Amino acid sequence: MVVAKALGADFIIVKSDSQLVVSQVLGLYQAKCDNMVAYLAKVREAMSGFKLMRMEQIPLEKNHRADVLAKIVEGEGHTLPRGVPL
């Protein structure tokens, strides 16, 4: 979300393979753990910069692209595979 905001995006689609995270971000489930409450506050702050945001839960096996991108951002030395659209 930070990169999308820096690039001037107004609309963003966030996909996650975690039903729990998606449900907590959307307010369907309550976060009980202090760490998750703090994480949700950061996510909601990041979300506030967009005119429209959609969040979707996707199957784990369809989340490979996001996993690769996350590892690149985390600096794990991975390179972006050919054919992975950003």
Image (spheres, rainbow, N blue to C red):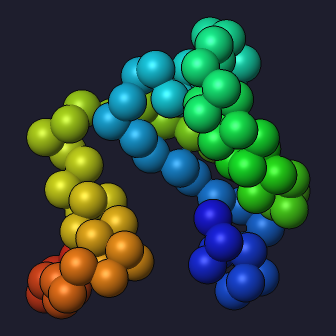
The residue depicted at 63 percent of the width and 13 percent of the height is 32
Quick check: 15 above or below 69? above
Residue 15 image-quadrant placement: top left
The residue nearer to you, when weighing 6 against 43, is: 43
Quick check: 16 above or below 3? above
Kindly tell me whether residue 13 is visible in this rendering: yes
Q: Where residue 62 sits: x, y (%)?
A: 20, 45
The residue depicted at 46 percent of the width and 20 percent of the height is 20
The residue depicted at 64 percent of the width and 59 percent of the height is 12
**Is 61 on the left or on the right of 28, as rendered?**
left
Residue 17 image-quadrant placement: top left
The residue nearer to you, when weighing 19 against 31, is: 31
Q: Where residue 70 sits: x, y (%)?
A: 35, 66
The residue nearer to you, when weighing 38 against 49, is: 38
Kindly tell me whether residue 47 is visible in this rendering: no
Q: Where residue 3 sits: x, y (%)?
A: 61, 78
**Is 86 on the left or on the right of 53, as rendered?**
left
The residue depicted at 64 percent of the width and 42 percent of the height is 39
Q: Where residue 7 sits: x, y (%)?
A: 69, 86
**Is 12 on the left or on the right of 60, as rendered?**
right
Q: Farthest residue in the front direction?
A: 34
Q: State the quadrant of the C terminus.
A: bottom left
